[in-house]
Image (cartoon, grey):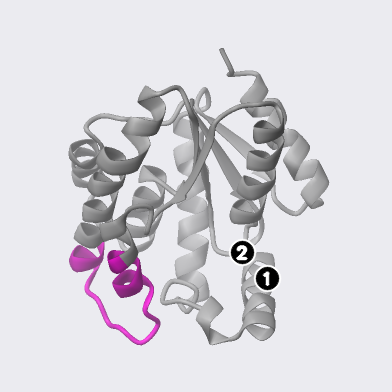
């Protein structure tokens, strides 16, 4: 089973992914936790480039680095894990490209869909958990994390304008409307415990 966790900055998806993994492992399942960018050896190098807060990058260059990361990630990590029957939990996947590079960077959505298909070889998640919350709250959480953990916890995408983050959120919401059978929208303003319960309920409904 392939589950992706999506949402804007500060939505809490990474925390939820770790909690879900703990619960599934406790049930005896093999769980592979991964992320984009950075889920493969090549991806870790690309992640450094992509998230460097001091680096300027044109949208097309950003896009192709994310796609290169995804192609390697699918081939090296995701498909092998799925082939042996593991549950794969992935922090961001193809929907992020549509939301960030499409709706926020204004790149052509039809082209992005075609390129995503090429990078993934047609692989799609069985379930996508979309963590939705107001942009103001997401950015507040990002700033709090920066204060607690330092500038290393603040990246190039965190530093984008509020209008950019609003476009990302609206992009995700539109994507969810187009794929209601795959995407489960979660209220990320709820407590971690409530969000975890909703995640597990959605996953259990799709387990074979």
Asked whether residue 10 is drawn in magenta, I would say: no
Q: Are marks 1 and 2 in contact (CB under 8 Å)?
A: yes
Q: Can you see residue 91?
A: no
Q: What stretch of residues is rendered in magenta?
A: 45-62
144 vs 46: above or below = below
- From this viewpoint, is residue 166 visible? yes
Place residue 44 in its image quadrant. Answer: bottom left
**Residue placed under numbered mark 1 in the picture:** 141
Look at the numbered disc 2 and give the secondary structure of its residue.
Answer: loop
Decide if residue 78 is on the left or right side of residue 129. left
Residue 1 in the image: x percent, y percent? 48, 25
Residue located at (19% from left, 58% from top): 64
Q: Which mark is residue 37?
A: none
Q: Quadrant of the C terminus?
A: top right
Residue 113 in the image: above or below residue 91? above
> Which residue of the protein is positioned furthest toward the top in this rendering?
208
Residue receiving disc 2: 10
Magenta span dominant secondary structure: helix
């Amino acid at each position: 089973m392939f589950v992706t966790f999506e949402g804007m900055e500060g939505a809490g998806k990474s925390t939820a992914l770790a909690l879900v993994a703990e619960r599934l492992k406790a049930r005896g399942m093999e769980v592979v936790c991964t992320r984009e960018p950075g889920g493969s050896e090549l991806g870790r190098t690309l992640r450094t480039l992509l998230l460097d807060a001091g680096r300027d990058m044109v949208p097309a260059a950003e896009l192709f680095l994310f796609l290169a990361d995804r192609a390697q990630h699918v081939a090296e990590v995701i498909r092998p894990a799925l082939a042996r029957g593991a549950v794969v939990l992935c922090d961001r996947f193809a929907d992020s490209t549509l939301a960030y590079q499409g709706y926020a960077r204004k790149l052509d959505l039809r082209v992005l869909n075609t390129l995503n298909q090429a990078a993934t070889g047609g692989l799609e998640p069985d379930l996508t958990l979309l963590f939705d919350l107001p942009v103001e709250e997401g950015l507040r959480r990002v700033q709090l994390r920066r204060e607690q953990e330092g500038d290393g916890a603040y990246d190039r995408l965190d530093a984008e304008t509020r209008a950019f983050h609003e476009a990302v959120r609206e992009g995700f919401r539109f994507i969810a409307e187009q794929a209601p059978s795959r995407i489960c929208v979660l209220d990320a303003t709820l407590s971690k415990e409530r969000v975890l319960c909703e995640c597990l309920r959605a996953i259990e409904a799709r387990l074979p």
